[in-house]
Image (cartoon, rainbow, N blue to C red):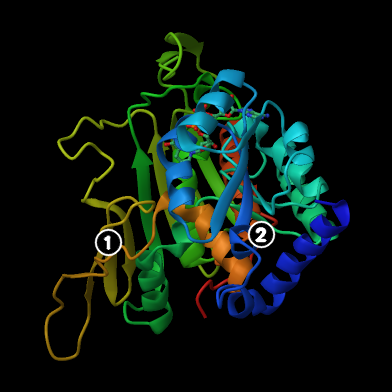
Amino acid sequence: MSSGKKIDRRNFIKAAAATGILAKTVFAGNSQGTSAKKIRVGHIGCGNVALNAYIVAMQASPFIEIVSTCDIIHSRAEALAKKFGIPKYYYNVHEQLAGPEFDLLVNTTSMPSHFEVNEAALEAGRNVWTEKPMALKVSDAHRLIELARKKGVKIYPAPTVVTSPQFKFMAETIGSGKVGKIFSAHATYGHEGKLWSPWFFQKGGGSLYDLGVYNVGTLTGLLGPARSVVGMYGISTPMRTVHPHDGPPEDVKVTADDNTMLIMEHDNAVFSHIQTGYTYFSGRDDKDISRTDYTMDLTGTDGIMHLAGYDWGPHGVDMVYRTETEPGKMERYCEDPGTYTWQGGPAYVAECMLTGKPSLITAEHGLHVLEVMNACLESQETGRRVKIESTFNWPIFR
Ligand SMILES: NC(=O)c1ccc[n+]([C@@H]2O[C@H](COP(=O)([O-])OP(=O)(O)OC[C@H]3O[C@@H](n4cnc5c(N)ncnc54)[C@H](O)[C@@H]3O)[C@@H](O)[C@H]2O)c1
């Protein structure tokens, strides 16, 4: 394919995303073959999440065709490509970007690599779906957003929490006033820290970036941007052992938070609290992943909402609210998960790119979540409350 044709197609995707015409022209059927009907994905980071969740989710999507994969660990790139029938594999992002054309880079590398990989892809004019956080420094996240703007592409950061039907239900219920005004909320996510890669326990990893990040996304999404943060963290277990799927166990000196508490101040005297850590019992019968009890409580002046299950895999919302005629009764709402999955981010944004549907997941929200998390770490290190500068388009459902 000549470079002229490549640019044409990329501009076509961009224009279509802006106007929504692709849905009409492409899904109506044409003679250009499968690649014209789908967003072509270059995937990078062939570890646990790719192997066990992301690739299967992308291959199940009608909106995605995976053209290449990449990992700095050569054996992982090759093994993943062979297991899933991905045509090309590479050992660094620059070689991958010079290989077969793609529209969207899907970044599931380890957190400390996110910025450099995202920057390289944006620089090459590619859209990006990135695992969280989009960068480690707020200044780097600003740089990515600016670069995307300059190149006329988009960067979409995980998590996907704002796309769950339970999030929509809670956001719309808050907006309706049914539970009065919410002034306080609490969320939690933790497990024992039985992990497979050293970086989870080292600076640039940690339980807040890995687990608490979902709660920060949900609570800022529901209650609005944070204006200041107070936080504490500690290291409960100075040494951990990780168990990679393709290598021997390794002992790791822990240098990142593994037990963390965060309080956010939102506007108008609204406060929320998050607790997260690798210090949480998770050997339950329901195997933690399908945890069905409450992980989030939103207490309003006229009602209460509890989220059943984690916000990245919710089971429903229990709600009680004041009525004029009867005493309030706790009832379960929104049990149907629809098509929502935490690993469905690339399929979601590919659909948005093809149809012009606006994405609920935005780079500005991802940057805000990063600033809140960094403020929590800074608060522990300085003993001070930390102001938050960034904001994002809120409410998410109008
Ligand atoms: N595993 C999960 O259950 C899970 C769930 C949700 C989100 N995530 C997120 O997904 C990301 C990956 O998690 P994981 O558990 O798969 O980690 P992992 O350590 O198993 O895999 C990461 C892979 O990225 C590769 N890599 C690192 N830097 C690279 C670079 N510059 N270029 C190419 N490859 C590079 C590593 O060699 C490794 O194979 C993280 O951001 C994590 O927080 C993971």
In the displayed image of the protein, which residue is found farthest to the front? 31
Residue at image point 36% right, 23% down: 194
The residue labelled by disc 2 is 364
Inspect the image, locate mark 2, and give the three-letter code of the amino acid beneath it: Glu
Question: Mark 2 and mark 1 in contact (Cβ < 8 Å)?
Answer: no
- Judged from the image, the secondary structure of the residue bearing numbered disc 1 is strand
Viewer-closest of 187 and 271: 187
Few, some or many C-alpha atoms within 10 Å of disc 2 (few <14, some 14-19, many ≥20)? some
Viewer-closest of 92 and 358: 92
Q: Nearer the viewer, mark 1 or mark 2?
A: 2
The residue labelled by disc 1 is 306
Inspect the image, locate mark 1, and give the three-letter code of the amino acid beneath it: His
Q: In the rendering, at what x and y percent does residue 7 appear?
A: 83, 58
Q: Mark yes or no: residue 270 visible.
A: no
In the displayed image of the protein, which residue is found farthest to the bottom? 325
Q: Mark yes or no: residue 210 visible.
A: yes
Q: In the rendering, at what x and y percent does residue 289 appear?
A: 28, 41
- In which quarter of the view is residue 311 placed? bottom left
- In which quarter of the view is residue 89 placed? top right
Ligand 1, by image quadrant, is top right
